[in-house]
Amino acid sequence: MISNDTIIALATPSGAGAIAVIRVSGLDAIPLVAPLFKSAFGKNLNDQPTHSIRLGHIIDGGKILDEVLVSLFKGPNSYTGEDVVEISCHGSPYIQQQIIQLFLRNGCRTAEPGEFTLRAFLNGKMDLSQAEAVADLISSDNAASHEIAIQQMRGGFSHEIKELRTELLNFASLIELELDFSEEDVEFADRTQFKELLVRIREVLRRLIDSFAVGNVIKNGIPVAIVGEPNVGKSTLLNALLNEERALVSDIAGTTRDTIEDEIAIGGIGFRFIDTAGIRETKDVVEGMGIQRTYEKIEKSQVTLYLIDSLAVLQSQERSEALLQSLKKIKNTHPHKPVVVIANKIDCLEVDQQLTLTNLLEEIEGITIQMLSAKTKEGVEELKKVLLSFMNTGALRNNETIVTNTRHYSSLVRALEEIEKIQLGMDENLSSDLLSIDVREALYHLGEITGQVTNDELLGNIFANFCIGK
């Protein structure tokens, strides 16, 4: 996959802006740009030192395309490890395309998605997990996902995996050496130390695998379903949480006939709120389809907010009994899923009525009760704190490695399976040649994570998901 072509792409978002950055990388990056750049102070770009910036104009024949700043980064001390030229021009889409087309006519080719970062990986500037963290950093939209991506890009996760792999590789070498002297019946690998190493590797792998449950929701947002009967204030609550008029609010029951989703960050963690159609008996086909989707969203959500009309529940024995039955059904179906019963419209209740309602809801074990007024926003901040409490952020606070990548998770699981096979083989006193098979497999799966073991198809799949210009 190594290419000596000189590549070019827009490194900033497309469209109009104050400035745009066009990136060029490759063996001929500087000599290709130099004749098309006229320095304001007569400098020859070929003679300029690395990590320097020059003011001048991009010239197409005798025509000035734009006044620009040209930044030079000579390999190997550049992002890609090659010579890199970055042209900061004015952000007109016309100017951007004119400059890019000029360089394409003079020997550049358009970069593929993620090709700059791919070259950085191939040239040893970063390992594969760090390269993937670059894409995560670009797409991070809250403090937690940003923090994890930064840590992985700086090599925290890679370092941990490489240390484990190095130690395992040292023992693997001794085991392989034993095979060369099998006729002499010599042991070079200390079996006691090897067992201790396997226990430690297993513990680390289990911790990393367990962290994926947290990392995955941090990366993708925690889905929270807002459910309840029609016209209890679900859309009003969504608007209050988002602090904008995102959902249509009406006094007419059944207004929401499909799910509405939006995301906010609470305490640096992304929560994806899903406003669902009201649950009730209906003959309306379209509304019925919306209610069916509500049940599907409850199934897929990690937290359920069950909104009730406090006044209506207190005034109707039938509704209060129906509510309790509905909550029991949800808890029986999803016993480990957090359910927050939000007693809405508390601005209409007296203190003794709030107490009565609380006593009623406490009949259901395992639920959290939150008094709130979606209309006045009383209790909304307290609800956000409740939601954040469901998220185990201990590992994040302690700056521990958190796995967010599905590919990494799969490789860790397979590596753990091999480690457990080795432990079982050690307990059964298997021969070195049989142990070495599982050791090599464990090394392979750990190497997959950092890119010490890879193939063109894997790299193509990973970097195809990058944006062009990165």
Image: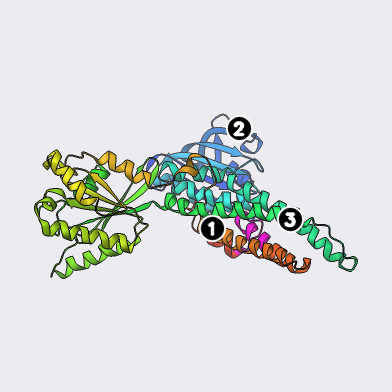
Marks counted in the figure total 3
Q: Residue furthest right?
A: 184
Let me know if residue 444 is in the magenta part.
yes
Q: In the displayed structure, would residue 418 be above or below residue 210?
A: below
Q: x%, y% of residue 250?
A: 12, 52
Would you say the magenta stretch is mainly helix, strand or loop?
helix
Side of 233 relative to 435 (left or right)? left
Asked if the residue at tag 2 contacts the one at tag 1, i.e. Cβ–Cβ closer than 8 Å, the answer is no
Which residues make up the magenta segment? 441-456
Residue type at mark 1 is Tyr
The residue indicated by pointer 1 is: 409
Q: Position of residue 45 (x, y in %)?
A: 61, 37
Closer to us: 234 or 128? 234
> Which of the pair 10/47 is nearer the observer?
10
- The crowd level at tag 2 (other Cα within 10 Å; few <14, some 14-19, many 20+) is some
Residue 295 bears which disc, if any?
A: none
Between circles 2 and 3, the one closer to the viewer is: 3
Mark 3 neighbour density, 10 Å: few (under 14) some (14–19) many (20 or more): some
